[in-house]
Image (spheres, rainbow, N blue to C red):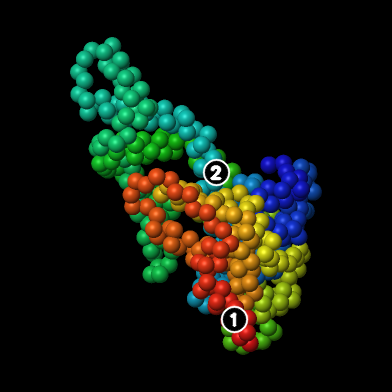
């Protein structure tokens, strides 16, 4: 997608409030990818992404900025936590796993796009398959002409959804179940690993026509997709467009000690270093180069500092941005100005139970004020504090709503309501002000 840095920031502003410096940095990094793609192959190979390190408390938008950025340009994206990795010889995950996870994400992304391209054709094929099944069930033994008319009528009824809830017995592909190869480890899908090596099994299943149509459409789409071309495209995207977000990098920053856990921390940094510098990682789809992937590291850095990272790793993150704690004004904007804001989410949830939820401006102001003060007097968890406050605030309404066919009831949340229902939280907040 050909977006200017300003357009990228405008798109991010729809979902994330404040943090202009960080948005600007990622927008430039993304635009530089587009600029690089326009160059000759010789020059393109010389230019590597300028990785970014974000410093700031939890809940201020570090992960969300990276996630939204990837979604904006449909780039493969994964978030990993640095604390899950340990140096070779210690119990923990292998750092190369992050690249393999990114490749899996790219494969899934491309497969979804290719499936969308052939969905119409796959749906038509699945409908023909279903019509044949339904015709057998209906046992119509008339002549060829009559049968053709009969099948056309079945197709029309199928497309209208008249058979959606009808239960049939269908022959579908038997997917291999995921299983843990190592106790306590991640579940591995053997089908995705061994794929073509294992014979394709099918089994009879009882399911509704709607469910069967979904499975038939997926099977037909698989037949229409060129797997080799999709894999090649996915690997290209992972190498050139992939974004790896390494969270909690401050937790592996050493303090200059050479004993205890700090040895392992520095080991993790040294294991991550070649991945970020540029290396080739073997995956089940083939070798993948990490030279042109964009790495965004993030951490609160309350105890340690960016300077506590080993110099080589610091040098691989030339762009450093600091994200600020959210203010009352930021909370007001989060509640009112973002797409699918928290107030909208609760309104549509409760609308299911015929509650017309409305927030007055002074209620929004009170919620923002309380959220900011709780963050100041206890742990600063950023925008996540709003979830806690809103759950407390709407607990009674959420509990009492539903369970009957009632007319629509309008419930207005004003400042008085907020202060009344958040008494417990504000009392604790006021006490904490005086605790040293």
Q: Considering the numbered disc 1 on the image, is that residue within a helix, a strand or a loop?
A: helix
Quarter of the figure with the C terminus: bottom right
Q: Residues within 10 Å of mark 2 (few under 14, many from 20)?
A: many
Of 87 and 67, the residue lying toward us: 67
Quarter of the figure with the N terminus: top right
Of 422 and 105, the residue lying toward us: 422
Residue 260 position within the rendered picture, expressed as x and y whole percent measured from the top left: 59, 87
What residue would you read off at disc 1? Answer: 432
Residue 84 position within the rendered picture, expressed as x and y whole percent measured from the top left: 54, 71
**Residue at (37% x, 39% y) in the render:** 215
**Residue 432 position (above or below residue 242):** below
**Residue at (41% x, 49% y) in the render:** 353
**Residue at (48% x, 61% y) in the render:** 394
Mark 2 or mark 1: which comes first in sequence? 2
Of 140 and 158, the residue lying toward us: 158
Q: Quadrant of residue 134?
A: top left
The tally of labels here is 2
Q: Residues within 10 Å of mark 1 (few under 14, many from 20)?
A: some
What residue would you read off at disc 2? Answer: 110
Residue 276 position within the rendered picture, expressed as x and y whole percent measured from the top left: 67, 63
**Residue 433 position (above or below residue 237):** below
């Amino acid at each position: 997608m050909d977006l200017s840095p300003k357009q990228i920031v405008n798109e991010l502003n729809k979902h994330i409030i404040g943090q202009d410096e960080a948005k600007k940095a990622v927008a430039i990094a993304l635009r530089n990818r587009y600029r690089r793609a326009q160059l000759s192959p010789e020059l393109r190979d010389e230019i590597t992404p300028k990785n970014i390190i974000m410093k700031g408390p939890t809940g201020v938008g570090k992960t969300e900025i990276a996630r939204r950025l990837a979604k904006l340009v449909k780039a493969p994206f994964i978030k990993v936590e640095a604390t899950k990795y340990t140096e070779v010889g210690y119990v923990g995950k292998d750092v190369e796993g992050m690249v393999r996870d990114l490749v899996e994400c790219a494969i899934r992304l491309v497969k979804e796009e290719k499936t969308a391209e052939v969905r119409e054709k796959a749906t038509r094929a699945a409908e023909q398959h279903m019509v044949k099944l339904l015709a057998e069930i209906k046992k119509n033994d008339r002549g060829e002409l009559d049968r053709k008319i009969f099948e056309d009528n079945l197709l029309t009824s199928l497309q209208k959804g008249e058979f959606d809830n009808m239960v049939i017995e269908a022959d579908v592909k038997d997917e291999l179940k995921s299983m843990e190869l190592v106790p306590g480890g991640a579940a591995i899908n053997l089908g995705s690993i061994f794929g073509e090596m294992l014979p394709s099994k099918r089994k009879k299943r009882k399911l509704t026509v709607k469910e069967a149509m979904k499975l038939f459409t997926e099977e037909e789409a698989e037949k229409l997709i060129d797997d080799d071309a999709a894999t090649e495209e996915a690997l290209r995207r992972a190498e050139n467009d992939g974004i790896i977000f390494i969270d909690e990098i401050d937790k592996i920053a050493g303090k200059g000690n050479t004993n205890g856990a700090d040895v392992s921390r520095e080991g993790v940094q040294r294991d991550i270093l070649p991945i970020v510098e540029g290396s080739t990682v073997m995956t089940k789809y083939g070798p993948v180069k990490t030279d042109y992937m964009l790495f965004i590291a993030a951490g609160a850095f309350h105890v340690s500092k960016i300077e506590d990272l080993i110099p080589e790793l610091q040098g691989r993150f030339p762009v450093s941005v600091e994200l600020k704690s959210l203010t009352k004004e930021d909370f007001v904007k989060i509640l009112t100005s973002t797409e699918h804001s928290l107030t909208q989410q609760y309104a549509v949830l409760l609308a299911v139970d015929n509650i017309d939820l409305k927030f007055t401006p002074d209620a929004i102001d009170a919620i923002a004020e309380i959220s900011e003060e709780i963050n100041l007097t206890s742990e600063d968890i950023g925008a996540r504090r709003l979830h806690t406050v809103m759950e407390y605030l709407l607990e009674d309404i959420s509990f009492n709503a539903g369970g009957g066919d009632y007319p629509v009831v309008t419930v207005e949340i004003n400042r008085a309501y907020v202060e009344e229902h958040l008494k417990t939280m504000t009392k604790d907040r006021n006490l904490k002000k005086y605790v040293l």
